[in-house]
Amino acid sequence: MSHIFQDEPRILAVDPCPRGFGFAVLEGPKTLVDWGVKVAGGGNKNLRCLNQVAGLIALYQPDVVVVEDYAGEGSRRCPRVRELIDKIGNLASRKTVMCRRYSRSDVRASFKWFGASTKHQIATAIAEKLPDLASWLPPLRKLWMPEDYRMNIFDAASFAFAYFHFENLRRKSAWERAARKEFAGP
């Protein structure tokens, strides 16, 4: 599958959940290629999820797979999901695809410019940037309500946006270092 925009990286972002995982495929920060929730019922849920992620990698041939950094601040993941996240990272490495991890606090930092800090505010900001997702935006969750399964799509997309945010910062910093070195002279 060829990329729509050759200079934009294709990102597969994955967010495991009790049902399976949510995912988003983006080609640059403005082009949503695909999204959804994959259900992995029955026995060995991690193996089923891993096989489905492998299928997405084969189908979309991403440049980067992005998952949660469960060791980071703000993450509360059960041991099964932690193991799955590690296995997704290992799968990406075996497929020679770069894997990046971002914590929930990284996601909040990348959305602070939009005035978004809660999961729902971040999801709303994503729906504004990617209108195809607007109809998938769950209603604001009340304390007694379980989290809507569609939120995992937005969580996955938020990891992709964190990648774009921090990659831009990294590139800007590298450019500034190069510019300082050039102007510093011999």
Image (tube, rainbow, N blue to C red):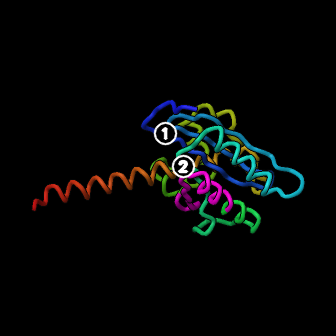
**Residue 3 image offset from top left, x and y in percent:** 52, 33
- Along the horizontal axis of the image, is 123 left or right of 141? left
**Does label 1 or label 2 sit earlier along the sequence?**
1
Residue found 53% across the figure and 41% down from its top: 10
In the foreground, 51 or 180: 51
Q: Which residue is mark 2?
A: 64
**Residue 97 image offset from top left, x and y in percent:** 56, 51
Residue found 52% across the figure and 59% down from its top: 106
Using the image, determine if residue 33 lies above or below residue 48. above
Q: Which residues are magenta?
A: 87-106
Which amino acid, mark 2? Val
**Residue 131, located in which quarter of the rendered image?**
top right
Q: Element at badge 2?
A: strand
Residue found 76% across the figure and 44% down from its top: 38
Q: Element at badge 1?
A: loop
Distance from disc 1 to disc 2, alpha carbons, whole Å, reads 11 Å
Q: Which residue is mark 1?
A: 28
Q: For the N terminus, which image quadrant?
A: top right
Mark 1 and mark 2 in contact? Answer it, CB < 8 Å: no
Query: Is residue 31 visible from the viewing direction of this image?
Result: yes
